[in-house]
Amino acid sequence: MKQIYYSILLLFSSLVWAQSPFVCTPSTSLSVNLPPNTFTSTQINMINQTSGTLILKWIRFSNSIPTTWACNLCDYNNCYTGVPSMGTMHPISGLTQGFIKLETNPFTYTGTGTVVIYVYASGAPTLGDTLVFNFTASGLTTVQEENQQKEEKILMLPHLIQFQNVDKLNILKITDINGRIVFEKTLLPYENEVILTNSLPAGLYIVHTAKQVYKYLKTD
């Protein structure tokens, strides 16, 4: 009698797990066009289809993201640098969702890349879904290309320094002749920046940007 009971129980369990214990939304495959110099989030959610708690695991099948891009993976309650070979999410119930999210930035580089991830329920490795993330980066727009071709310019006056055509985010530093930093600021790309130098004593200074080093003579 016990043998029959256990046989029925095993049969019932196999029938329950014959269907995937979770559903992926919006799809198991996404294709995204990436803008330059921006981290774009691409996410696939996993909705628990069981009446209990579900632990989801994942394995990276492949990753052809160009090495010149940045691509970082997050799952439910975990974030990683890059795309690791495997991971385990925190348990999900009917009130929470699992997910795989990729934060991808091609910077100014064109190209294509694909990440393939297999997600499955702990204890049922054959019942899972293969997630495919396809990315395409077309590079800079025409306006951005024109801006990049412009030469960085600097205008130095006794009481101010003006920057034009700084082509990327970088840190401006002004040091005195002894190397001591007397001023520091983040310069935004393609913005005209004016630095007032009224508070600096008269003397010779060195101005550092990502591209150039300039001498600046401050006078009263």
Image (tube, rainbow, N blue to C red):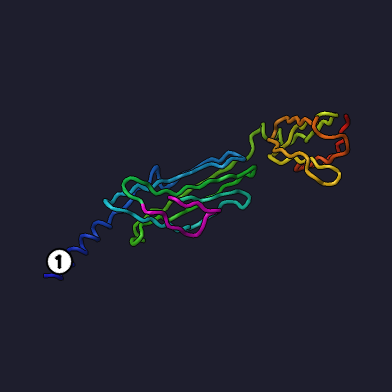
Q: Position of residue 71 (x, y in %)?
A: 56, 49
Depth check, front residue: 31 or 53: 53
Seen at 64% across and 44% down, the residue is 109
Image quadrant for the N terminus?
bottom left
Q: Quadrant of the rendered structure where residue 16 is?
A: bottom left
> What percent of the width, then of the height, locates residue 175?
81, 42
Q: Is residue 20 magenta?
A: no
Between 77 and 24, the one lying in front of the other is 77
Say few, some or many: other residues with alpha carbon within 10 Å of mark 1 (under 14 / 14 to 19 / 20 or more).
Answer: few
Residue 191: x %, y % from top left:
70, 31
Taking the image as shown, residue 197 lies to the left or right of residue 14, namely right
89 magenta-colored: yes
Q: Which residue is mark 1?
A: 5
Q: Is residue 179 above or below residue 151?
A: below
Residue 129 horizontal side relative to residue 81, left or right: left
Residue at image coords 84%, 31%: 156
Q: Can you say which quadrant of the picture contains the C terminus?
A: top right
| Residue 73 drawn at (x, y percent) | 51, 51
Name the residue: 47% across, 59% down. Answer: 86
Position of 33 relative to 158 (above/below): below
Q: Is residue 18 above or below residue 139?
A: below
Please identify the dominant SS of the magenta region.
loop
Q: Report helix, strand or loop for mark 1.
A: helix
At a point 53% along the width and 46% down the height, the residue shown is 103
Hey, which residue is sitting farthest left in the picture? 1
* Three-letter residue code for mark 1: Tyr
Residue 202 falls in image quadrant? top right
Segment colored magenta: 76-91
